[in-house]
Image (tube, rainbow, N blue to C red):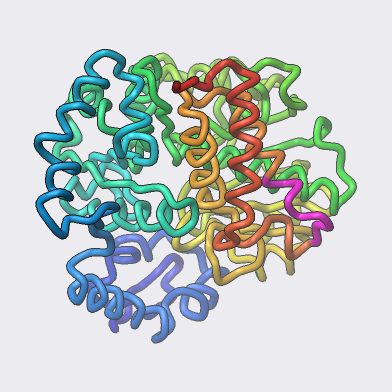
């Protein structure tokens, strides 16, 4: 442990080699220092890092391949491999859709990343991203019984869209993970017509869970969803997708209700259509055109004044209690930066927040895309979907919200490890895939 000098000269303990917090302490405001030490930097939390290294070293990773069939004798070998497998190859050669019937394709996902935006670690590259992608594969298997495998590319500057297209025959779907914006948007758009579902979880998984959480938060606070004044902190992948879903940008208006009053903030403050430099990023340009109808300018502090909801998908400790106090009565705070949120729950609650959610499992109201992506892909695979439609995403959000029969201030979403959630979301997604024309019939 060592002491570093934080904002306004305050001293705070910081793990010497902690990649999450080194070089970031100087940006943490004083009101969060006690929470930082208490909630994140305790001895128990630091031990988690050590124990995780030991776990990964012991098992050489977290996933492995198992055989589904016997290979005990020559007959088994003849059925599983040559000569018997030739008949399967001929059948698929005549009709490639039979790969869904005869191969691992029907239940296998590729988890594709270049390691350019991993957790709070930033651009750490493909090698360093493997443990996180393995973790996602583990969640797919344990929660949805989907076989998933990490496909990690090393260079952020490499355009690997063609490579992903070329490995698509093996997989029933592709989950794009931890790819920095705007490349993640461009990749997802370029891969939408390859015949299997391609979804960037950081975008759409997060947006689905946020919509579900917000629907239930409105039930608890008696706020009308369509009348909400919302501030979104962060204009990257998650921020753009959340904005798009809440405002039905590009969606059929019949699919979901639309929030009209949304302001999005990035590191430069409020995004508005008159701000210089927006043409360099077409996604921020879209945000500027579709949000902030009143043309407000200024800082995050200015944006939050009079808001009903603040959704943070940005950086640690950027929201202060004073900002929460400036919001409308019974504000809703979703502080989703990980591992340290934009504001800690007890600070937000003390400042008057009615409901607070974070991305962490050690606080109530965990708002994490792990509630969405296993069920979405399970539902898509169950009907051999060709893509993931807007109808499927909206259906997932409502299934997730409706799973909690009686939402409370401290329970607006179910637990991430609740397998019943996956089944409910998968069923809703499968039905939406059929009605939206994305399901594939395999004879």
Q: Nearer the viewer, residue 171 or 90?
A: 90
Q: Quadrant of residue 299?
A: top right
Instruction: Provide residue 223's location: percent of width, then percent of height.
Output: 86, 43
Task: Say if 326 sits above or below 418 in the image.
Answer: above
Q: Quadrant of residue 88?
A: top left
Instruction: Provide residue 168's location: percent of width, then percent of height.
Output: 27, 27
Quarter containing the C terminus: top left
Q: Nearer the viewer, residue 390 or 27?
A: 390
- The total of numbered circles placed on residues is 0
Magenta-colored span:
400-408
Does 48 sit left or right of 230 as displayed? left
Instruction: Provide residue 43's location: percent of width, then percent of height.
Output: 39, 86
Residue 303 seen: no
Does 390 sit left or right of 258 as displayed? left
Task: Say if 403 sits above or below 428 in the image.
Answer: below
Task: Say if 91 sits above or below 322 in the image.
Answer: above
Q: Residue furthest right?
A: 222
Q: Residue furthest bottom?
A: 43
| Magenta stretch: includes residue 154 | no
Tell me the residue at 72%/22% (across/down): 255
Tell me the residue at 40%/28% (across/down): 198
Task: Say if 263 sits above or below 8 in the image.
Answer: above
Residue 259 seen: yes
Q: Nearer the viewer, residue 82 or 196?
A: 82
Instruction: Provide residue 83's location: percent of width, then percent of height.
Output: 10, 34
Q: Quadrant of residue 131?
A: bottom left
Does 329 sit left or right of 342 as displayed? right
Tell me the residue at 67%/25% (across/down): 247
Tell me the residue at 23%/53% (across/down): 130
Does 58 sit left or right of 263 as displayed? left
Quarter containing the N terminus: bottom left
Q: Nearer the viewer, residue 360 or 311?
A: 360
């Amino acid at each position: 442990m060592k002491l570093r000098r934080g904002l306004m000269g305050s001293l705070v303990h910081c793990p010497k080699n902690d990649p999450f917090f080194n070089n970031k302490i100087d940006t943490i405001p004083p009101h969060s220092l006690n929470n930082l030490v208490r909630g994140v930097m305790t001895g128990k939390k630091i031990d988690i890092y050590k124990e995780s290294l030991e776990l990964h070293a012991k098992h050489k990773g977290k996933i492995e391949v198992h055989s589904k069939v016997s290979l005990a004798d020559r007959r088994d070998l003849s059925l599983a491999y040559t000569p018997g497998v030739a008949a399967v190859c001929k059948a698929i050669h005549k009709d490639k859709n039979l790969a869904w019937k005869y191969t691992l394709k029907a239940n296998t996902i590729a988890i594709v990343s270049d390691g350019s935006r991993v957790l709070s670690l930033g651009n750490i590259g493909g090698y360093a991203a493997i443990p996180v992608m393995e973790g996602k594969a583990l969640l797919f298997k344990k929660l949805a019984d989907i076989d998933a495998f990490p496909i990690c590319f090393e260079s952020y500057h490499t355009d690997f869209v063609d490579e992903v297209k070329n490995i698509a025959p093996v997989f029933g779907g592709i989950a794009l993970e931890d790819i920095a914006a705007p490349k993640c948007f461009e990749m997802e758009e370029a891969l939408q017509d390859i015949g299997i579902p391609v979804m960037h979880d950081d975008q759409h998984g997060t947006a689905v869970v946020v919509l579900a959480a917000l629907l239930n938060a409105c039930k608890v606070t008696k706020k009308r969803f369509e009348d909400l004044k919302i501030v979104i902190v962060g204009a990257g992948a998650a921020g753009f997708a959340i904005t798009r879903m809440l405002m039905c940008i590009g969606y059929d208006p019949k699919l979901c209700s639309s929030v009209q009053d949304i302001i999005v903030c990035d590191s430069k403050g409020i995004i508005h259509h008159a701000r210089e430099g927006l043409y360099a990023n077409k996604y921020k340009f879209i945000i500027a055109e579709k949000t902030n109808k009143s043309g407000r300018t200024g800082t995050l502090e200015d944006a939050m004044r009079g808001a009903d909801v603040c959704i943070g998908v940005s950086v640690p400790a950027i929201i202060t209690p004073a900002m929460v106090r400036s919001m409308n009565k019974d504000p809703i705070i979703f502080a989703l930066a990980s591992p340290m949120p934009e504001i800690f729950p007890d600070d937000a609650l003390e400042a008057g927040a009615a409901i607070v959610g974070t991305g962490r499992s050690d606080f109530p109201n965990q708002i994490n895309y792990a509630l969405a992506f296993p069920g979405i892909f399970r539902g898509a695979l169950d009907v051999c979907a060709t893509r993931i439609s807007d109808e499927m995403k909206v259906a997932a959000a409502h299934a997730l919200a409706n799973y909690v029969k009686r939402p409370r201030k401290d329970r607006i979403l179910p637990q991430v490890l609740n397998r019943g959630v996956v089944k409910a979301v998968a069923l809703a997604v499968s039905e939406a895939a059929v009605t939206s024309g994305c399901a594939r019939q395999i004879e």
